[in-house]
Image (cartoon, grey):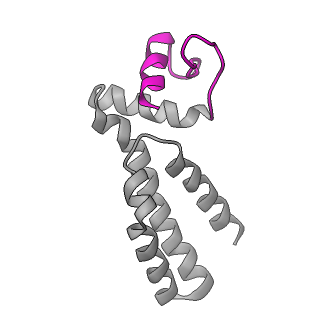
Amino acid sequence: MSRSSTEAMVSGPLPSSLPLTMASGQTLESPLFYWSERAAYSVLGTNLFAARLPSALAWISVVLLVLALGRRMYGEAAGMTAAILTATAFGWVKYARLAMMDAPMALGLALAAYATW
């Protein structure tokens, strides 16, 4: 993922450039994640921390949304339990720190669930 964002940085200004696959010209997934990586690159430089920051922030946001949604649906204790289980789940701890689309996609789903409840 971070390589796609780095390649897109060379291709033009932020709103108009979309991440491309290697030499194929096809656009990848939603550009918002790549744009957030590029914003982190412009502030922090092109490094692993900047590449992983948007995904990690999305993960933290998911945990907070699970807490709020659990409180709203079932009360304080259920919300806190759900947030703790989400924050300590092996898959989250392993993959949310990587520069992957999984955490931002989960954030979108959590936002949709929160908005509809």
Q: Is residue 8 left or right of residue 94?
A: right
Q: Position of residue 63 (x, y in %)?
A: 45, 66
Q: Quadrant of residue 54?
A: top left
Relative to residue 13, is residue 107 depicted above or below?
below
Question: Does the magenta segment cover residue 24?
Answer: yes
Observer-nearest of 8 and 22: 22
Relative to residue 60, is residue 68 depicted above or below?
below
The quarter in which the C terminus is drawn is bottom right
Relative to residue 105, is residue 110 depicted above or below?
below
Q: Is residue 114 left or right of residue 48?
A: right
Q: Quadrant of residue 27?
A: top right
Observer-nearest of 83 and 64: 83
Tell me which residue sits at (49%, 78%) in the image: 82
Q: Position of residue 39 (x, y in %)?
A: 41, 31
In terms of secondary structure, what is the magenta stretch mainly? loop
Q: Is residue 79 left or right of residue 56?
A: right
Which residues fall within the magenta stretch?
1-29
Q: Position of residue 49 (x, y in %)?
A: 28, 38
Tell me which residue sits at (57%, 10%) in the image: 23
Observer-nearest of 27 and 62: 27
Q: Position of residue 106 (x, y in %)?
A: 57, 55
Tell me which residue sits at (48%, 87%) in the image: 76
Q: Quadrant of residue 88?
A: bottom left
The number of callouts visible is: 0
Question: Does the magenta segment cover residue 25?
Answer: yes
